[in-house]
Amino acid sequence: MEVLMKNEIAIYGKGGIGKSTLSANISAALADSGKRVLQIGCDPKHDSTRLLLNGRKITTILDYIKTTGALDYKKEDILFEGYGSVGCVEAGGPEPGVGCAGRGIITSFELLEQFRVKEEYEITLYDVLGDVVCGGFAVPIRREYADTIFLVTSGEYMAMYAANNILRGIKNYENGKYRVAGLLYNSRNIEDEDRKVYAFAAAVGLPVCAKIPRSNVFAQAERKNITVVELISRKMKLNKGADIQDEEQKIYDIFKSLSRNIIDGVPMYEANPLSDDELEAVIYQTVKADYKKPFSKCDSETKESENHQGITVNSENHQGITVNSENHSVKDEVTSLNRYLSKNVIRNEPLHGCAFNGAMTMSIHIRDAVILAHAPKNCAYLSYQSISSSGRRRLFERGALMPVSISPNFQCTDMNETDMIFGGMEKLTKKIKDINKQQPKAIIVISSCPAGIIGDDIDRVKDLADKDIPILTVKSDGNLSGDYLQGMLLCYTELATQIIDKSVKPEKKIVNIVFEKVVAKNTESNFQIIEEYLKQMNITVNCRFLCNTTFDKLKNFCKAELNLLAYKDYTGMILEKFFKEKYGCKFFDKQFPVGFSETAQWLKEISSVMGESDVARKIVEENTAVYKERIEKIKATLKGKRLMIITYNHSLDWILTAAIDAGIEIVKVCILNFSQDEGFRTQLNHSFLIEENYDNEKRESDIEKYNPDILLSNYESGKAYKNCITDTIPMCPDAGFFSGCSMVERWASLIKLNLQGEWKKDERLFKKYYTR
């Protein structure tokens, strides 16, 4: 096959500026000059090639993909021949307001490359919408596509605004290679139009490569569904151009001259967009300067342009405002929030997981609802694996069954490439109708990244709700909303707002449990411990928000006279703020107790609030004797031992108290930065060293410096330290009197075993017998 010299041209312009008419006429003029031309319409209106095809509308690539299986694709179904053998292709687009037309452009180009369509043509011309310079519409200005770019404009402000925006997009892809040929001035005959256009051209350093007058000749050609170039060419062939009018000839000559310059090669210029303020200054003459128009051999209006005064603008950087973003305490931030935001969103930290996954993880705990992920299969799969992993791990390790995690009740719309282009609302609607037949208590729709990117408004499906099956929505939109914790917060607040009945009155001796850590192994055992304490005080748990609960229990949330936070960390404080503000709820001041001191104090205070002090006193007395006896047994082993802690936990009194009671010396507590909490909290009068936002790079040097006998952290480093035992601290410790006691008992056992010597024996055997 003949190897053709390639030239790829992108013509950008605001919608309605006339770029499709200009593109078709340029293609026709190039074809008349003997060039093999391919014109690709990249506008959802799909009318770019209409005048080349005598008004015939052709199948767009996106419509073709939507209705044809991939194995049945044929090049001739999307490639059509127009005037002068110009190849005509229309990318097409979705219905207005749905889907992503930019993604459609990318998909269309992928199919054209699959068919190797451009290889048959010398010149490819892309006719591209310029109002939106998103990633999809910017494809033709990437380096592997257009090597020549023209911007169509008029003297209207929005036309030049769009052209300036396109220059910004081009700037991002230049990388030292200039590809802007200049402006195509499509006149609208508005007041002061010439001055505005030439001033803008001078300000951005581009030539006006052609000025196309406003003329009835275009309307005459369009009535015949042809280009002006074809109209004049026909007249030339019929009677050697005897009846060609001067105005017709002038317009024809503009396109012929422009096509010759394209074939010969036009100089390229750097993209130098203006700021919005500079653009206004140029157009509305609020600054004055000398106009020096860049030379271009393709400029057919050189003499005319020199008569107009232009403006040169200095594009120096403008002075901005620096904001002092000092860190504040978690309490300051929580009380100042207008919204309920994760630490990641406030701090602008790197994403800690996905908001969609966070919302899915919490929503599945409404057992009698169906959770519908408006997402691709892979998003649903990753969420399923994340949710079920904790249940599977507990089942295999402890033989305990967590039905909510093992088999989460959620389904997926299975969004695909077609949905990304045309919108996924039709698929979502169908899925909801299918789920309604299952008669769940409610349907909860959660959106992922793709749904958010293409603008699917999941709130619209609320109209499909059956009178007995409400439809609830959580617009997590994947990472667009923030991190995993932000997804959890969205789920908490959105579902509470849509489910809880404010008219329900509180009743005595009824409480809610708020913010249990559903992925922790000990969530259910901790609940059972707290529930047993409450039962002994004649207190009933109404609702667990959100953990292993039902729709009706959530609906009757306000039935509780008091709410108990499982964890009073960053997220717990935000939820407490939310329920106080939105529902006037009362909260107990303390979180689930961990360790002896906290548990004793928790029972005394809650029993006082609920009028059951005698019961609580008895529980504390019984457990005090047991605690003292257990600690006394290990004092001889642990007294004087040095403890160092490196942890993400921000609340450590449960283990610190037990260590101190056992006679251990605490040499240093190192608190690492944690995405879900902030601010070390303690009720102890202490003399030990605490370092927050600890740099983990200091770990080895600090261990050598402080020489601990016991090193406690959230993970094992894999390194054995001389004369030091290591242990892991759980992120979510067990509730109740003995969590700290049990841990220090383990240290005493390890010290008595003297495993250091045994490990040395193992090391020698390993070196002797291991085959390298």
Image (spheres, rainbow, N blue to C red):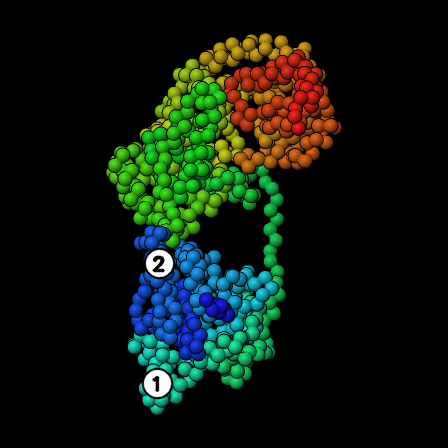
* In the image: residue 504, left or right of residue 131: left
Could you tell me which quadrant the C terminus lies in?
A: top right
Residue 284 in the image, given as x and y percentages of width and height: 50, 73
Q: Which residue is nearer to you in this view: 91 or 649? A: 91
Q: Closer to the observer: label 1 or label 2?
A: 2
Q: Which residue type does callout 2 highlight?
A: Lys
What residue sits right under mark 2 in the picture? 74
Q: Quadrant location of residue 378?
A: top left
Instruction: Please tell me which residue is depicted at 41% across the width and 59% down the height of the picture.
Output: 115
Q: Residue furthest bottom?
A: 242
Residue 99: x, y in percent? 37, 53
* Above or below 240: residue 451: above
Label 1: how many Cα within 10 Å (few below 14, some 14–19, many 20+)? few
The answer to whether residue 22 is left or right of residue 200 is left
In the rendered view, tell whether residue 42 sits above or below residue 604: below
Q: Residue furthest right?
A: 705
Residue drawn 32% across the image and 80% down it: 220
Residue 150, can we see it? Answer: yes
The residue that mark 1 highlights is 237
**What residue type is disc 1 on?**
Lys
Which residue lies most toward the front here?
1
